[in-house]
Image (cartoon, coloured by chain):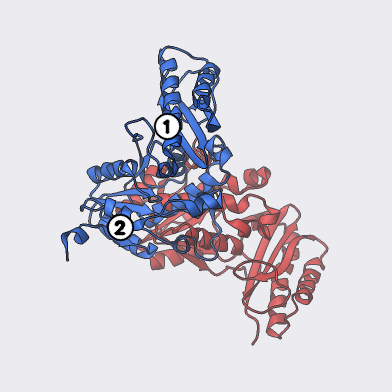
Chain colours: A blue, B red
Amino acid sequence: MVKLQTSLPELVTDPATIRALTQEAREQGKTIGLVPTMGALHDGHLSLVKASTEQCDLTVVTIFINPTQFTDKNDWTEYPRDLQSDMEKLAGGEVSLVFAPTAEDIYPHGHVTSIHIGPLEKIVEGRCRPGHFSGVATVLAKLFQMIPADTAFFGRKDYQQLKVVERLVQDLNVPIKVHGCPTIRDEDGLALSSRNVFLSQEQRQQALSIPKALKLAERRIEEGETDARAIVAGMRSELSCSGALHIDYALLADAETLKPVTTIQGPTVALIAVRVGSTRLIDNEVMMPQR
Amino acid sequence: MVKLQTSLPELVTDPATIRALTQEAREQGKTIGLVPTMGALHDGHLSLVKASTEQCDLTVVTIFINPTQFTDKNDWTEYPRDLQSDMEKLAGGEVSLVFAPTAEDIYPHGHVTSIHIGPLEKIVEGRCRPGHFSGVATVLAKLFQMIPADTAFFGRKDYQQLKVVERLVQDLNVPIKVHGCPTIRDEDGLALSSRNVFLSQEQRQQALSIPKALKLAERRIEEGETDARAIVAGMRSELSCSGALHIDYALLADAETLKPVTTIQGPTVALIAVRVGSTRLIDNEVMMPQR
C-alpha cells in the first residue's frame, strides 16, 4: 500500500452501508457532519468540508448528480463528472466517508414520493427551473434519513437552496442543524461554481459583471438608497454593459421569504442569474439597510 | 397519589419533549413502538397498542386530529374528541407516553412543506378526498422525525393509508418498520371505526351490507370467479339492497398499486366506501385468487 491510497476517504455506494456506518459512529457518540454535493469539487465545496471537519468528529461528503433537480436533461448529461479527481481532492484523512450512489440506488423502481416547499420553491430561481427545488428537497430529505448527521453544510452561494433546506428541516422536524457557509470567490470576484469550467476566457471576463452588480447594490444600500427599483436598474445596467449576458433575473428580495421588495427595509438579498453563452451562473449577496 | 392516576401513561404535548424522551429511551437501547391515532380510541386502536407493547420496550400513542388530512372542514370540526376518555383506555402501564400536540405545535406559523405520494394519493379514496393522503403522509413524516421509533403500527382497515405509509417510508428512506394489523370487527361484522358512533341503530343495520359485500367478493373469488366486473356487480347489488347507502366506490384493485383490475390474477383488494346519512364508512378485504 502506498501512502496516497490509504489517505483517500472510504468510498461507499450503497444506501444500506452508509446508513450502517454512520449509525454505528453515532452510537459510539461521534458527531457527524454531512456535506451534500454534486461532485466537480472546487474550493467552495472544500470550505464546507473544512467547516464540517472542524465541527464534527466524522465528515461524510455525498457526491450525487441528482437527476430530479435538473429541469433540462442536457444540463444533467453535460454536468461535469470526475469521481477520481473528487476523491483526490478529499484525500488527507479529514473526510471519513464519501457516499456516491447511482440514480437507481436513490430512486429504485416504484419511487413516487416528492416533497414540496410551498411558495418558496416557485419563486425567483424556482420560476426559471420548475421542479428544481422539489428535486433538491426530496433528495436531501432522503440523504438526511440515510445519514443521521448532526449538522449539514451548504454554501450561501446557492442562497435559495439554503432557504429551502432550512424550511425543509424545520417543517419536517428533521433533527439536523443546517449550517450556511460563505460564498468563496476567485481573486477576480467571480463566485466559484462547478459550471465555471465551461466559460471561455472572454466569457469569464464578461461574467465579472455579476459580482460588480452585487457590489454596486451593496454600495447603493450602504449610501442609504431604499428604492429597490433604482438599485435594480443599476444592477441591470452593469450586467448589460458587455451585451453578452442574458439576464434571467436581477432583483432585490426579502432575505427570508425571497419575495421581491420595492423598498429596502430589513435584511435584503440581491439575487442574480444570467446566462453566458450556454452556461448559467447564479450569485447573491445579503445586505442590511442603513438605519 | 391514588393508584389509578399513576397507571395513566405520561401525557406530552410538546414536540421537543417527546423527541427528548424518546431519543433518551433509544440511547438506553430501548425499542420504541409508535401508534399514530386521531383519538376516539376503540378496540381497533387497542389492538395496535397491544401489538406494539408485545414487540417494543416502549410504546408511544399519538393523538392528533390532523387538520390537513380533512378535505371537509365540517368533518374535522365534528370528529369525536375526548382526550380524558382516551387516556383512561390507555391506562394500565403498558403505554409509556401519549403525545397529543395542538395544531399549532405541529404546523407553526410559516409551515409550507408537503409530501406527495404520486399516483397512489390520487386514486380510489384519494379521488374522493383530494389532499387527504398528502396530509396523512406529511404529518406522519413529521411524527417519524419527532419520535425515532423502530416500528409504527397501522390498521389494515385503512388499507390505502397503509400502502401510502409503506411507500412514504420506503421512498424517503425513513429508518422505521411499518407493521399492518388486522381489521377488528364487531360481532355483527362491521369494522370498528371512530365514526360508527354517529350511526343510528337502523343505519348500523344498513351498514352491515359493507362486510356482507366483502364476504360475497371473497366467496366468488374462492369459487374461482376471475371476472372483476361480475364480482363488483354483486358487491354493488348487496350494498344497494337497503336503498340507504350512497356508494362512493366499490371495486377490486391490485393489492399493491390499488389500480382497479378487470381480471383477478394476483393479490386483490376489495375496497368499499359508502355514506350512510352523513357518516362515511370505508372497509376492505385482501384476497388471493384460486390457482
- The circle on residue A147 is none
**Coordinates of residue A8 in the picture (x, y in percent):** 24, 57
Disc 1: which residue:
A205
Frontmost residue, B119 versus A188: A188
Is A198 or A143 nearer to us in this picture? A198
Looking at the picture, tell me which residue is in the foreground, B160 or B174.
B174
Look at label 1 and name its amino acid: Gln
Mark 2 is surrounded, within 10 Å at the Cα level, by few (under 14), some (14 to 19) or many (20 or more) other residues, namely many
At numbered mark 2, what does the secondary structure look like: helix, strand or loop?
helix
Which residue is rendered at x = 72% and y = 77% of the image? B263
Q: CA distance from mark 2 to mark 1?
A: 44 Å
* Residue occupying the point 40% across, 36% down: A157
Same chain under badges 2 and 1? The reply is yes
Location of the C terminus of chain A (image quadrant): top left
**Amino acid type at image mark 2:** Thr
One can see residue B3 in this view: no
Q: Is residue A63 visible?
A: yes
Q: Which residue is mark 2?
A: A22
**For the view shown, which residue lies furthest in the bottom direction?**
B291
In the picture, measured across the screen, residue A88 lies left or right of residue B67, that is left
Image position of A247 with respect to B160: above or below? above
The residue drawn where x is 51% and y is 58% is B168
Helix or strand or loop: what does disc 1 sit on?
helix
Does residue B227 appear left or right of residue B41 in this picture?
A: right
Please tell me which of labels 2 and 1 falls first in the chain. 2
